[in-house]
Amino acid sequence: MPPLVLASPHDLKDFAGRELGVSGWFPVTQERIVQFAEATEDRQWIHTDPERARRESPYGAAIAHGFLTLSLASHLAKEAFQVRGTRLTVNYGLNRVRFPSPVRAGARIRARVSLESFRALPDCFEATLSVTVEVEGEEKPCCAAQWIVRYYA
């Protein structure tokens, strides 16, 4: 499904309290997990050693880092909705992040993005987004975050 495309950041105001969109499914491969482990110096065996994880972890498989899942939110959100008419978009931060369930290596994830609030500031527009990352075939989400994005027109 194509993303919702808004002509300007100001158009976001009409979506306050509503879903903006849902991304496509994205594969989280063991290779990507290992690359993330290398990039972040977090090489814990539950992420990088699939055989040991199969034997010893409570998940029965290697799992993605929670921060890997969170870092994919930007890509997934862009698949769900896009805002045109900006010269700069800035990740302003997060108010709340939770990782309720694991992402096993080889699983596919997608993001469901809603606009919690929107406000015009003197030099930009600020959107507070609710991002829920789902794992295909799983009941509980793997990540739930409240994300603040600033759009400079």
Image: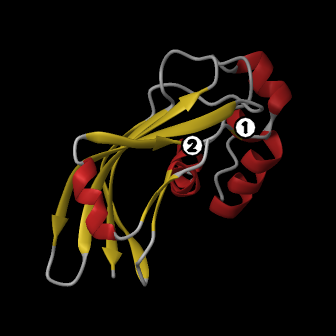
In x, y percent, where is residue 81? 48, 54
Seen in the picture, residue 150 relative to 96 is either above or below; the reply is below
Callout 1 amino acid: Trp
Residue occupying image coordinates x 24% and y 78%:
124
Packing grade of label 1 (10 A; few <14, some 14-19, many >=20) is some
In x, y percent, where is residue 123? 21, 84
Relative depth, front residue between 94 and 89: 89
Seen in the picture, residue 98 relative to 41 is either above or below; the reply is above
Quarter assignment of residue 49? top right
Name the quarter where the N terminus is drawn. Answer: top right
Packing grade of label 2 (10 A; few <14, some 14-19, many >=20) is many
Which one is in front in this view, the residue at disc 1 or the one at disc 2? 2
In x, y percent, where is residue 132? 43, 36
Residue occupying image coordinates x 71% and y 30%:
107
User: How many numbered tags mark residues here?
Assistant: 2
Residue occupying image coordinates x 77% and y 32%:
106
Relative depth, front residue between 16 and 31: 16
Quarter assignment of residue 61? top right
Relative depth, front residue between 36 and 15: 15
Relative depth, front residue between 30 and 40: 30
Q: Secondary structure at mark 2?
A: loop
Disc 2 designates what residue? Answer: 23
Q: Earlier in the sequence, mark 1 or mark 2?
A: 2
Horizontal relation, residue 2 to residue 20: left or right: right
Seen in the picture, residue 8 relative to 61 is either above or below; the reply is below
Determine the CA span between mark 1 and mark 2: 30 Å
Callout 2 amino acid: Ser
Disc 1 designates what residue? Answer: 45
Horizontal relation, residue 40 to residue 97: left or right: right
Q: Secondary structure at mark 1?
A: helix
In x, y percent, where is residue 46? 69, 33
